[in-house]
Amino acid sequence: MFEGLNVAMVTPFTRNGEINEDKIREQVRFHLAVGTDGLVPCGTTGETPTFSREEHRRVIEVVVDEAKGRAKVIPGTGTNSTTQTIANTLMAKEAGADAALVVTPYYNKPTQAGLIRHFTMVAEETGFPIMMYNVPGRTAVNLLPETVGRLSEIENIVAVKEASGDISQMADVIQHAGHNLTVLSGDDSMTMPLMAIGGKGVVSVVGNFLPHGMLELIRAAEAGDWNRAKDWHYRMFNISNAMFFETNPAPVRTAMNLLGWEMGEVRPPLAPMAPANVEKLKAAMKAYGPIPQYQAVT
């Protein structure tokens, strides 16, 4: 249902730090034109922890309205409160999204039993397709393969974004749950390795401005052309890793600004990239080769 290239959208801000709805619409049109399969606003890359509830709802509404069903829309709705996550997910459902990306609760450090309780309640009380999101480097809790297997038995838990960085764990997730749900990479650089063992695509950061390259990699893997997929993997590898020279999404936002997207600055508590890291980012972009300068799609 959510295979291929799903882009974790950067939220554009004005010079005053407000959400720039016109730029959101431009982003959506850009991705529709290049063939991006799914749009994932309001995640970590979108800086949703800095949103008001009204901003959260509005971003979802704008993406859904501009996409008009031509790409799947899977906004982030997860928090470390089960009650609030349910409310956010119902909000996304009412706004016309196709599914919700629900991260494991952060800071609370629930046990595996707590994770089962959390995701079960969200799924059952919303009746909405759920893509679970495992990113232990940010949440301090790891959604284990056996737990994913149990949760995959719930009909409307349909996918998992796996960002543990552990290919052995990813293989174990596919063994336990791949017959019931779609397993997607949460790290750009792990896309080809995961697809080689049965994964179905990625929720991508670098795809914000390089969907062309990531689509080439994914389409080659889907076709079983592993030599071509490997070539694109290595071409994308360094620039994908450059997206984490500092805390995401500062590098991807900086890259987009360098290309003329006019995305604004990160909101506090994040800070603009250090000048030395900006130079490293520029070098990685140059090494990748020509990147199309941004042009608005009308």
Image: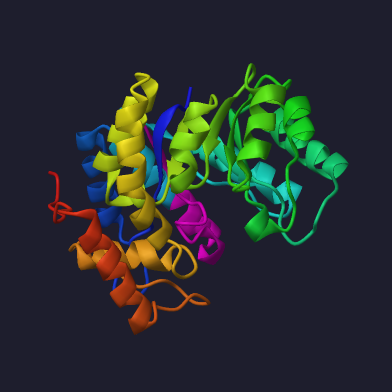
Which quadrant holds the C terminus? Answer: top left
Q: Is residue 174 left or right of residue 55?
A: right
Q: Is residue 187 left or right of residue 26?
A: right
Image coordinates for residue 74, horizontal then vertical, percent: 48, 38
Does 53 lie within the magenta span? Answer: yes
* Foreground of the two, 54 or 39: 39
In this rendering, the answer to whether 163 lies above or below 274 is above
Image coordinates for residue 267, horizontal then vertical, percent: 45, 73
* Foreground of the two, 252 or 87: 252
The answer to whether residue 38 is seen in the rendering is yes
In this rendering, the answer to whether 294 lies above or below 77 is below
Image coordinates for residue 119, horizontal then vertical, percent: 73, 37
Query: Which residue does the image show at 46% across and 70% down from the upper left?
Result: 246
Q: How many marks?
A: 0
Query: Which residue does the image show at 39% across and 82% down from the upper left?
Result: 274
Direction bottom: furthest residue: 275
In this rendering, the answer to whether 244 lies above or below 28 is below
Direction top: furthest residue: 179
* Foreground of the two, 210 or 253: 210
Q: Read off the magenta span.
A: 36-58
Q: Is residue 269 left or right of residue 272?
A: right
Query: Which residue does the image show at 33% across and 83% down from the upper left?
Result: 275
Q: Is residue 189 left or right of residue 53?
A: left
Image coordinates for residue 90, horizontal then vertical, percent: 60, 38
How was the colour assigned to the protein in this rendering? rainbow
The answer to whether residue 13 is seen in the rendering is no
